[in-house]
Image (spheres, grey):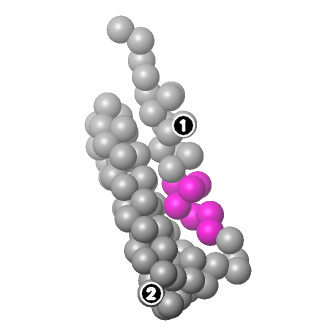
Amino acid sequence: MQDRTPDAVHELLAAVLEAITLPYGTPDYDRRILDRAGWAHAVATAALAGDPRDLAWNVDYLRAKLTAEQTDAEKRAARGGVAR
């Protein structure tokens, strides 16, 4: 059985980079980047402390949080609140 850990680590790092990358001009940037950094920190901490075979779960969790956060930002923009 091939060791998938390097692929999983790559996917985790890509998800963390996605989490901490938000254009500076994004309305509500400060709150959103703080939330994203917290999620990235929690996922990286869990990944370091856990079984390497669970890395895919950490990636899925972080990407789900980012998707939900983006959806919420788009809903606020549609209601005339803070734009995305």
Residue 41 in sight here: no
Residue 58 in sight here: yes
In magenta segment, residue 26: no
**Label disc, if present, on residue 10 of the rendered structure:** 1
Residue depicted at x 41% and y 12%: 2
Residue 61 spot, x, y in % from top left: 33, 52
Q: In the displayed structure, would residue 69 be above or below residue 6?
A: below
- Nearest the viewer among 72 and 1 is 72
Q: Which residue is mark 2?
A: 79
Q: Amino acid at mark 1?
A: His
Pick out the residue farthest to the bottom: 81
In the rendered image, which quarter is residue 57 located in?
top left
Secondary structure beneath label 2? loop
Residue depicted at x 50% and y 28%: 6
Badge 1: few (under 14), some or many (20 or more) residues near its Cα, within 10 Å? few
Which span is picked out in magenta?
16-22
**Left or right: 45 in relation to 20:** left
Residue depicted at x 57% and y 56%: 18
Q: In the displayed structure, would residue 3 be above or below residue 24?
A: above
Placement of the C terminus among the 4 image quadrants = bottom right
Badge 2: few (under 14), some or many (20 or more) residues near its Cα, within 10 Å? few
Residue 47 spot, x, y in % from top left: 37, 47
Residue 54 spot, x, y in % from top left: 30, 37
Residue depicted at x 36% and y 38%: 56
Q: Amino acid at mark 2?
A: Arg
Residue 3 spot, x, y in % from top left: 42, 18
| Number of numbered callouts drawn | 2
